[in-house]
């Protein structure tokens, strides 16, 4: 199973990397567009997290403080 998965990963990675790189070059991309069974979903998660952080808008918040007294005791 492990050997078959390894060979499948290589074939997928080699062929998809070549296809994506050629498609990218047709659109002016100069670098290699690497694709892999594990690397592609992980890269998607990283990009989504980056975009969420980039679009975050800070908001004002309030801090509540109180001084209480009851029966001669202060808290």
Image: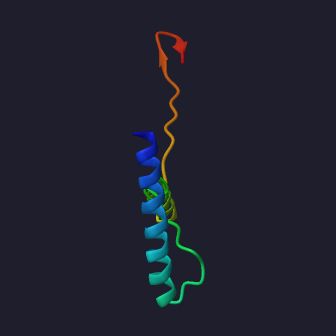
Quadrant of the drawing holding the N terminus: top left
Q: Is residue 16 above or below residue 66?
A: below
Question: How many numbered markers are drawn?
Answer: 0
Q: Nearer the viewer, residue 12 or 26?
A: 12
Q: Could you say which quadrant of the image residue 15 lies in?
A: bottom left
Q: Nearer the viewer, residue 42 or 70?
A: 42
Residue 13 seen: yes
Q: Could you say which quadrant of the image residue 45 lies in?
A: bottom left
Where is residue 36? Give x, y as percent.
47, 59
Residue shown at 49% from the left, 22% from the top: 68
Q: How is the image coloured?
A: rainbow
Q: Is residue 66 above or below residue 56?
A: above
Residue shown at 49% from the left, 66% from the top: 14
Residue shown at 47% from the left, 65% from the top: 55
Q: Is residue 25 above or below residue 20?
A: below
Where is residue 58? Give x, y as percent.
50, 59
Q: Nearer the viewer, residue 41 or 51?
A: 41
Where is residue 64? Give x, y as percent.
49, 38
Where is residue 48? Give x, y as percent.
44, 60
Residue at the right extreme of this rendering:
31
Residue shown at 54% from the left, 84% from the top: 29
Residue 52 seen: no
Q: Is residue 18 above or below residue 68?
A: below
Quadrant of the drawing holding the C terminus: top right
């Amino acid at each position: 199973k492990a050997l078959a998965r390894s060979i499948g990963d290589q074939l997928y990675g080699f062929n998809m990397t070549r296809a994506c790189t050629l498609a990218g070059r047709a659109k002016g991309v100069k670098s290699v567009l690497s694709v892999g069974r594990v690397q592609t979903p992980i890269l998607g998660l990283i990009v989504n997290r980056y975009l969420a952080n980039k679009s975050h808008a800070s908001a004002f918040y309030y801090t509540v403080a109180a001084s209480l007294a009851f029966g001669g005791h202060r808290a």
